[in-house]
Amino acid sequence: MNAITDRVLYRHLDEMAPWNDRLQVLECIGVVDEAPEVKTFTFRSDNQTWFRYRPGQFVTLEIPVGDEPVMRTYTLSSSPSRPFSIAVTVKAQAGSIGTRWMFENIRPGSHIRAYGPAGDFSHHNHPAGKYLFVSAGSGITPMMSMLRWLNDCSPATDVGFVHCARRPEDIIFRKELELLGSRMPGLSLGFLIEERSSREGWYGHMGRIDAVRLPLLVSDFRDREVFCCGPEPFMRAVREMLASAGFDMAHYHQESFSAPVVEAPAAPAEESVPGAPLQPAEMPLPVRFALSEVDGECLPGQTVLQTARASGVRIPAACEFGLCGTCKVKKLSGVVEMNHNGGILDHEIEDGFILACCSKPLSAVEIEV
């Protein structure tokens, strides 16, 4: 962008409010086939607002597949350096429900509700002189978001990019990656293919990533900030390979939508003040859902989300272990114990928000739902 375009863009942003996931829905403006069973859906706000997020974050889509919609979390493949639209690139797995519905129903002009963006998997949180992105399958999407941002904002950044796929035609974003490789002087690309294809010739690397192939593709991988995304067995193999090679795992980061292993009980994110913290209730506690005008009863050990469901109050939720942030609600009064996994920010907690899926009342509570 030139200087005049920059000024017009930022003046336009100053006049607009950022997208609010509680007030606005997304309108599809484009659907593109990326690879077999892989599509990119591009959206804008139905209220013509702009999107504020970090490259590598995700959104949760509310997909109306039946009487009760399902929640599906998808990483953004777009870059916040282009703030007037967002895109998700999704692969329909065997037995997919939500993704298959998107393939069959979402077209330009379609509307869908979304929550977020959220997530901590972003190079913005771990600035470094050199990066290594390692991905497999649709795990390429957050890497593409980060690489697109770097291409727009810091094209000389030193990035090693290793992507693994089953066949040549399964490499998502292949043409764009090859184009970026010709334009970003610090970008080195490495593709690993498991099997040849009758549809497309292949003269590159074959096999799975291992301790022999990684140094051939990125010789100085030990000196880089590593970001990894893909199926859990793939990420586990990468972790073990790096650790065995003497890599400092403090510089390893991975994206995962499964519950993390808890090694020790986490401290409550919120407790009564002043004085000693309240103890978990041994008797049912009242929970008031203010906007719904419903009074519920939270049994010992239950969360606000469980209480809402038992009371017939709908709170959107996806991961249900405090990561995605979909179930974020405003607590008007009372005290809860909240043990989350990064799905809510400190300033949001200070403003009275909680994640319903991982918040257990310690007193009578009133929720703005």
Image (cartoon, rainbow, N blue to C red):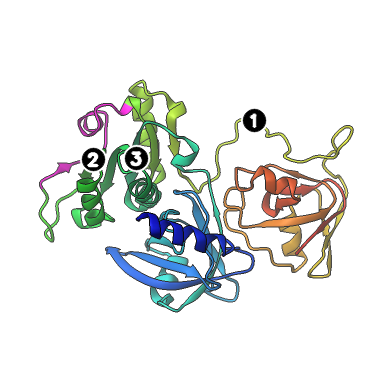
Do we see residue 159 in this rendering?
yes
What residue did someone put label 3 on? 133
Q: Which residue is mark 1?
A: 264
Going from N to C along the chain, the mark reached first, 2 or 1, is 2
Label located before the other in sequence (1 or 3): 3
| Residue 269: % across, % down | 72, 39
Seen in the image, is 12 located left or right of residue 33? right
Quadrant where the image shows the N terminus: bottom left
Tell me which amino acid carries mark 3. Phe
Mark 1 lies on a secondary structure that is: loop
Rounded to the nearest angstrom, the CA distance separating label 2 from label 1 is 45 Å
User: Circle 2 sits on which residue?
Assistant: 185
Q: Amino acid at mark 2?
A: Pro
User: On screen, 105 above or below 87?
Assistant: below
Q: Which residues are magenta?
A: 203-221
Please identify the quarter of the rendering in which residue 305 is found.
bottom right
Q: Which mark is residue 277?
A: none
Is 211 colored magenta in this rendering? yes
**Residue 236 is covered by the magenta coloring:** no
Q: Position of residue 139 (x, y in %)?
A: 37, 49
Residue 31 lies, in percent from the top left, at 36, 71
Q: Is residue 171 left or right of residue 17?
A: left
Q: Secondary structure at mark 3?
A: strand
Residue at the far front in the pictured view: 4
In percent of width and height, residue 115 lies at 57, 61
What kind of residue is marked 1? Ala
